Every structure is written in structure tokens, then in C-alpha cells.
Amino acid sequence: MLTIQPVTLIGSHVRLEPLGLHHADDLLEAALDERIWTYMSTRIESRSDLDRYLSAALAAVEKGTELPFAIIDLQSGKAIGSTRFGNIAHKDRGLEIGWTWLTPAYWKTSINTECKWLLLRHCFEELGCVRVSLKTDARNLNSQRAIARIGGVREGVLRKHIILPDGYVRDTVYFSVIDTEWPEVDRKLRDMLAR
């Protein structure tokens, strides 16, 4: 049985802390580049969009179905995006890491790699997960390559899975990491972060 509690995870470049209303100003500034939302099922274009996003995320925490994090750049101390645990299967000891977005100034940096390492390490070493899934839009080849590069195993495609805000009906590619694969994934991520 998984017991998910709010937690703060700290790395060398980033701190993942429970998402809260106090992150709103930083997140609004971080969210306003439309490139972030190309493949996402949500879109933040205004303060009211962000307020709805935060309300929905905090309601999911209350229900025990998600645990969202603010991604804090340790150098600036600012929230630069968000990620979360979702689709939590308490009995089956599995969950999904996703809903991840970063302001473009941090794309292709070690921030996202360190986020994934911190989250996966917590899942396998603290929570006792047997399975962690990750998913992405089938068009998002960069995300697919990144997930595979860290050791995520491609499981398949859910066709016409999600309708995006612009009306596009996306196919979703699912990947997973399981507990027996974690030692090798951990090694890969540590090697990537050491470069």
C-alpha cells in the first residue's frame, strides 16, 4: 500500500516542494511562454487560468489522487515550473510522474533530469513503488527520447487519448520504470547529472 504525504525533495540545482498558492506569482511569470503548452492538456495564459490550475491541483491533493510540486531553481529561489505524482494506485504501489512543465529558459538544462531523479528515487526508495509510469504526446519526440534515454521502457500508445485545449485529439505514448529496473535507471541518471 502506498502512503503519499507531502514532501520536499532537494537536489544540487532544484528543490521540489509541495505546490501552493504562494507560488502563484512566480508560476505565472514562468508559464506565459506559449511553447510550454504545445503538448499539454492544460494551458496557462492568464492569472485566472493559473488560479484554476492551482485550485484543481490542490483539490486533487485533498482527494489523495495527486501530489503536485513546484519546481524551485535553487540559484534564483524562484518557482520555474511544476511536476506531480498522479494516477496514484495505492493498493498496486504504482503512480505516474507527469504534468511537468518548465519555463523555456531552463529547457535542455540539468533541471528536468534532476527532477526526474529526485522523484523516481523517492518513489522507489521511500514509497516502495513497484511501477512508475510516464506519458507524453506522440508528437513530442524530444520527450520520448528523454524518457527512453533515462531507461523508461516504451509500453505502447493510447490512441485518441486526450483532447487538448485547441481541440487536437492526441495519441499518448506510455513508458514505465519498474522496481527491478530502478538500480540501472538510478545509475544512468546519476551519470547524466555528474556531467
Image (spheres, rainbow, N blue to C red):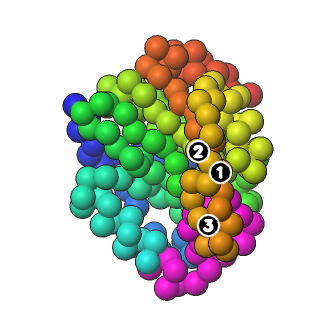
Q: Which residue is mark 2?
A: 158
Quarter of the image with the C terminus is top right
Q: Are marks 1 and 3 in contact (CB under 8 Å)?
A: no
SS for dot 2: strand
Is 76 displayed left or right of 70 in the figure?
right
172 vs 190: above or below: below
Structural crowding at the residue carrying mark 3, measured as other residues with C-alpha within 10 Å and reported as few (<14), some (14–19) or many (≥20):
some
Residue at 40% from the left image edge and 49% from the top image edge = 86
Quarter of the image with the N terminus is top left
How far apart are the two marked residues, 2 and 3, measured between alpha carbons? 15 Å
Q: Are marks 2 and 1 in contact (CB under 8 Å)?
A: yes
Quadrant in the rendering for residue 165: bottom right
Residue 35 disc label? none
How far apart are the two marked residues, 2 and 1, measured between alpha carbons? 6 Å
Query: Which kind of residue does numbered mark 3 sit on?
Result: Leu
SS for dot 3: loop
Q: Which residue is mark 3?
A: 164
Query: Which kind of residue does numbered mark 2 sit on?
Result: Leu
Earlier residue among tags 2 and 3: 2
Q: Examine the structure image and report whether residue 39 is included in the region drawn in magenta.
A: yes
Q: Which residue is mark 1?
A: 171
Residue at 24% from the left image edge and 58% from the top image edge = 63
Give the image location of residue 48, x and y in percent: 49, 85
Q: Along the line of sight, which residue is nearer the eye, 169 or 30?
A: 169
Residue that protrudes farthest toward the front in the picture: 159
Give the image location of residue 101, x and y in percent: 60, 57
Earlier residue among tags 2 and 1: 2
Q: Which stretch is magenta?
A: 32-51
Structural crowding at the residue carrying mark 1, measured as other residues with C-alpha within 10 Å and reported as few (<14), some (14–19) or many (≥20):
some
Give the image location of residue 175, x and y in percent: 58, 34
Give the image location of residue 14, x and y in percent: 55, 47
